[in-house]
Image (spheres, rainbow, N blue to C red):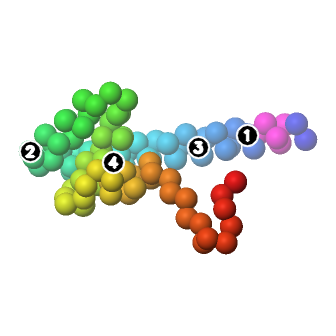
Amino acid sequence: MIIRFIENIGDMTIRMLYAIYEALKLFNKIEILLLKDENTKKSYNAISTIPAIGQKSALYLTLFFLKYPTANVKAITALVGLDPMMRDSGLFGAK
């Protein structure tokens, strides 16, 4: 029973590592396509200079700015999911 448990953990680890590997390959492909355009590359590099913004976040934000070029700060914040909003019906209050 213990051996099967260890084998299952090993199998799950291999699948997780493979999923991470595939995700990194996809990220690299997206990055290569994105950075072919000089203006997009400049935007990506500018966003990358912001403290605490890594490669993946910079890529994500650059793609949002491309998709929503007229969006303001509030809209981008909401789109990225950094702006939690309380929506009450009026009948029940938040606790």
Q: Position of residue 91 (x, y in %)?
A: 67, 72
Q: Earlier in the sequence, mark 2 or mark 1?
A: 1
Task: Give the quarter of the figure containing the N terminus.
Answer: top right
Is residue 93 rendered magenta in the image? no
Task: Give the quadrant of residue 52.
Answer: top left
> Of helix, strand and loop, which one carries label 2?
helix
Main SS of residues in magenta: helix
Q: Does the rendering let one see residue 29?
A: no
Is residue 5 rendered magenta in the image? yes
Q: Amino acid at mark 1?
A: Ile
Q: Earlier in the sequence, mark 2 or mark 4?
A: 2
What residue is disc 4 on? 60
The magenta region covers 3-7
Q: Earlier in the sequence, mark 3 or mark 2?
A: 3
What residue is disc 2 on? 38
Q: Position of residue 48 (x, y in %)?
A: 26, 34
Task: Give the quadrant of residue 66.
Answer: bottom left
Residue 16 numbered mark, or none: 3
Query: Looking at the image, is 31 positioned above or below residue 84?
Result: above
Query: Mark 1, residues whose alpha carbon is within 10 Å: few (<14), some, or many (≥20)?
Result: few
Residue 9 numbered mark, or none: 1
